[in-house]
Amino acid sequence: MSSNAFTNHLRPVLQDADEVLDAQVRLNTAMAPPPAPGTLWGIGALNRAAVVMLVSAWEAYIEQIAIEAVEALRPAGPLPLGNWPALYAAVKASAGKLHQPNVQNVKMLISGSTGLPDITASWTWTGITVRDACQKLEDAVGTRNRVAHGARPLIQTAYATDLQVFFQQLASHTDAGIRDYLMNILGIASPWPP
């Protein structure tokens, strides 16, 4: 089973981006001829919007998974809880200030919430190395930032579609990496069963 962050924060926004990309296909199919030879109606704006939404989904997911992870560390039983309340407050504050869900900031937030030294070690799957995943994340966040600051980069539909799949895989592997660390290193019961 996936984390609450994956199910309730990442997936809904990924679905929103999917709807934007689907609308783009329907719009371009319905509109003929295109405004100029070799162009399609509104495709650039819709692809930029999809990238902004996808990176926003990742950001919301990372903020929530850090909070869920620290919640899993809560000592059982009634008060006193030791240092846990301070850790929880610090993680919630850090998650609320994330704003740039790039590799370095994600590593710091996850490490600060769980003690896991490097979440990126779990970012590998068929056809993707840790280095590939990190570079793809940096590129996506950079593109989102450029768009947010007024740039209008040309973004291919294939890139936006691929990014959607990428973030789903990245979050799935982040879930697994945190779960494995909590269970196998810290000896905590799985906060979200596999």
Image (spheres, grey):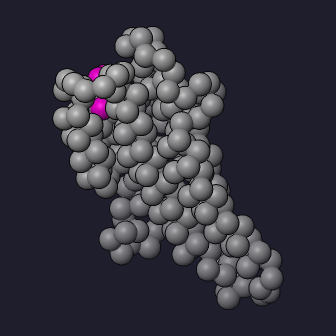
Query: Where is residue 179 drawn, in percent x and y?
Result: 48, 23
The residue nearer to you, when weighing 102 against 32, is: 102
Residue 189 appears in the figure: yes
Q: Quadrant of the C terminus?
A: top right
| Residue 55 visible in the displayed image | no
Q: Is residue 78 above or below residue 168?
A: above
Quarter of image, res 35: bottom right
Q: Is residue 1 shown above or below 64?
A: above
Q: Where is residue 146 drawn, in percent x and y? A: 36, 65
Looking at the rendering, the stretch of residues picked out in magenta corresponds to 113-117
Residue 89 occupies which quadrant of the picture? top left
Of residues 79 and 38, the one drawn nearer to the viewer in this rendering: 79
Q: Residue at x 64, y 58 (%)?
A: 15
Above or below, 177 against 106 in this view is: above
Q: Say whether residue 135 is magenta.
A: no
Front in this rendered view, residue 166 or 77: 77
Quarter of the image containing the N terminus? Answer: top right
Please name the residue shown 43% across and 52% down the image: 60
Residue 90 placed where, x, y %? 21, 40
Residue 115 inside the magenta-drawn segment: yes
Q: Is residue 180 left or right of residue 80?
A: right
The picture places residue 14, in percent across and down from the top left corner, at 59, 55
- Type of secondary structure dominating the magenta stretch: loop
> Which residue lies at the image location 23% right of the left edge and 34% below the top edge?
85
